Amino acid sequence: MLAAALGEAAARAVAVEATLLLPGSAKGPLPSPESGLDGAARGTRVLPWTVQALAFPAAGALTLLERLSSPLPGEPGAPEWGPGAALRYLAVVAEHAEALVRRGRVLPQLVMEDGAHTARWVPVITGADATAFRELAAAMPPVCRAAVEERSSSQVLREALGALADAATRRALPDRLLRGNRAGLRSPLAERWLFALTGEDPDLPGAGAREAAELGDALRGWLEAARDLEGPIRLCFRLSEPRPEPEPGTEAGAGGGLGSEAGVGAGGDGGVGAGPAGGGDAWELEFALQSVDDPSLYVPASLLWEGTRVPGLPRRPDETLLAGLGRAVRLCPELHTALRDPKPSRMIVDTAWAFGFLRRSAPLLQAAGYGVRLPAWAGRKGLGLKLTTRSRGSTAARAVAGQGFGLGELVDFRVDLAVGDHTIGEEELEELARLKVPLVRVRGQWVELDDRQLKAALSVMERRRAGEMTVAEVLREVVTGGDEELPLVGVDADGALGDLLSGEADRRLTPVATPAAFNGALRPYQERGLSWLAFLSRIGLGGILADDMGLGKTAQTLSLMLEERAAGPVPPTLLVCPMSLLSNWQKEAARFAPSLRVYVHHGGTRGRGEELAAAVAGADLVVTTYGTALRDAEVLREFPWGRVVCDEAQAIKNSGARQAQAVRAIPARTRLALTGTPVENHLAELWSIMEFCNPGLLGPAKRFRERYQEPIEARGDEQAARALKRATQPFVLRRLKTDKTIISDLPEKLEMKVWCTLTPEQASLYQAVVNDMIAKIDQTEGIERRGNVLATMTRLKQVCNHPAHLLKDGSRLAGRSGKLARLEELAEEIVEEGDKALVFTQYAEFGALLQPYLAAHLDRPVLWLHGGLPKKRRDELVERFQHDDEPMIFLLSLKAAGTGLNLTAANHVIHVDRWWNPAVEDQATDRAFRIGQTRNVQVRKFICAGTLEERVDEMIERKKALAQSVVGAGEDWIADLTTEQLRELFRLGPEAVS
């Protein structure tokens, strides 16, 4: 089955046996946690196991990994298997390798493999690519390093990336280079090496040691020239455009007109001219030193030569500057004139020189690790298209009446050519073509032009540029964004279409009043959301309602169903959600929309056959889970759904996942995705959710990746980001609850850290665990070392909670833990004030210890919700907490209750132990801080001073913007620290003991 699914890729594989280090027991290795199989067993250890595997050559592996971006063969929507996390990770590595090849970031080298000389294309990992490499290495799933031969994640990644980049380069070479390229064994090694680079066989048998050493030395210098700089400070280049001519009457001084700057450069104070003197063509290339970690630390060379001392720079910054310039000349030979000056600070250059720097030198310098600052317009397409549409009378009248329009409606359109922020006419375009200069200033703005753009623009001028088109055609133009040579850079539309395209439809459309059948009153922003949802539904488009958690996506969805049913019967809505929210949808529908007929399709006794058909026919809303939708995909596809809704739509963010394919395969007139996080990690997630809402709208995944994902994520391409926003904003509505213009009466969330100390017993246990850990990690390596570190971290966190949590000996709790003492005090105050509190712990066993103790200490019931409770019991606990008037403490397992529950009766939230993932903690806090909360919510996070808890908290605070990438995967990153870093992280400070 596996070979059939892989098709051509499997034909190049060889069946092998591999020895891997995997968790297992005496019975065998545990199944993958992603398989859904129960692998729990006593005595689980990491052991070497011999497993069956397929070994792929690099070219075959590249083909296989590319296939993972598309659904695998099988029944539509319900494939038999899917890639696991490790395979998906390697697919990302393959994408990165192909991106390096497309950008020319590979160099030919002579390398040693298994004792033999081989010709390889080696990726050049510098600058932003080096940052991406480090992030990929940190994100590597442990199973990728399961080989018995221990290697670091960086080593494994470097080998995988190298092999895939070599395969991608050879595949990209024209076929004519690959045919017959094989020199004889007596040919010079350099000639054989060249043929091996362009052929299918990279090996060089019989290479002489001396000849190989000479060739290797020559190639090594080539590689060194492309490598990035070492150290925390780098040389930076800043290119500034000429200042406008001050004299009145000139084109630049008058601020208008079209013309080229034809003068040559002139030197200035401290600078070296690139040509004869001239006035209006003086571009400045400034040299500076810049911090690699903090780019805002930017010190111009002119200040260095004046003797200015700047904290953070090396002792001899002048040497750093000159050495950097000397190396940069190898990438940009034109810089050699600057080295004639003993104190170079800048170059004054002409337009032709500046254009060459923009097009050729700047990308090379940036990729090699130098800092490069360019004008804001640099890199943008100089010419683009602007689309203007105007509604016709009937369309405009219906829009004013709040009826919207249809995709088949006709609108008048006009296409103009745009340069920068201005549109230009045919005469101006012809003048640009006549000038034949690549860099021009148009009405005060500098723009880059090339022959291909000019030819494409002249072709546009010859075609029909005005007339009528349908709304569907307008949307297609906006989403596709023009073509590669002439991108769509602006859209000007009026009426309801303009509101939709601007992303302001919810504010500008006539609000739909709260439906009469809705039990309650929608807030103003919710009524605007309802009008947006109804508007999209009427024209047959899907959307993403991405309101912040707690803003009432459920209420808006239910009100939409009521609003459309007020006009007459409509087909049922299928709503797919996580199992934890199944009961929530039932209760919210009964609360807000009691007239809706709700059928829950879930569980072993769920309807089938005629029973299911009758239930669907008699329902307005059918609620099911993602798991059930996957299992019953074939059955659910047979019903005429009016709408399919995905709640917590991040569940379908992986387009290749089985449940995402299953849900996408269910037909419906319109689709709606509900999520507070449309993009959690990568833009591919947005594509997957949008592909569910409006199939095909953003094009194939590969085109989306090339056009948007890679330019934005890898290069920070602002033009691509603007184009993606323009393409998606008509279909995405996102409001934040912290925005007071959205909701002014939500109370404040008051966050505070509660510092706790250890008792002497805790401190003694803590130090003993640290000592034991250091001894073990000094004697182990690889996966075993990693396991020791993670186990130690868990034990230290247990010590910080309570000795009994670590020892599991059933001993007494009172008086032995600083955290417990503080929790007792807070719980007493909360109960005395008549309040309610949520107390989160990530350890179910600790919660089981706390619940009876706190209940006895407070002399009142303490509720305890954890993953082992049946659904009915969970619902009873939530109901009791929300509606019982007595003050109450609700103890919850973070994993079991971190999402999906509405617990607004609480106005206190306490995190007893830290998950160290801000997003997870915030989601748990939002059980109380959401719509329906009428009081300020006090959030307390317990931290034991002088322990690893304090130091990890400091790391999170220092890198708040990067917290998700640093600790987003939980705590595994700690296992990659060095022994010395672990000593510092885990050490017991003197302030720890009370």
Image: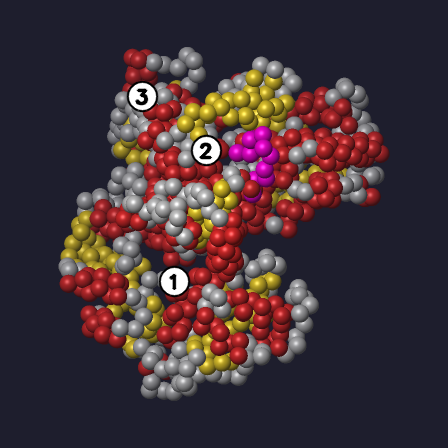
Q: Position of residue 489 (x, y in %)?
A: 31, 59
Proximity of marks 2 and 3: CB atoms separated by less than 8 Å: no
Q: Is label 2 or label 3 in front? A: 2
Return the residue at label 2: 87
Q: Which residue is mark 1?
A: 379
| Residue at (22, 48) in percent of width and height | 473
Q: Which residue does the numbered mark 3 point to in the structure image?
A: 634
Identify the amino acid type marked 1.
Answer: Gly
Q: Position of residue 137 (x, y in %)?
A: 54, 42
Colour theme: secondary structure
**Disc 3 residue type (three-letter):** Glu
Q: In the rendered image, which quarter is residue 891 located in?
A: top right
Report the magenta residues as a range.
Answer: 144-154
Residue at position x 18%, y 56% in the image: 412
Q: CA distance from mark 2 to mark 3?
A: 27 Å
The mark closer to the camera, 1 or 2, is 2
Mark 1 vs 3: CB contact within 8 A: no
Upstream in sequence: badge 1 or badge 2:
2
User: Is residue 322 highlighted in magenta?
Assistant: no
Q: Amino acid at mark 2?
A: Leu
Q: Residue 425 in the image: x percent, y percent?
A: 22, 70
Quadrant hosting residue 302: bottom right
Q: Nearer the viewer, residue 879 or 521?
A: 879
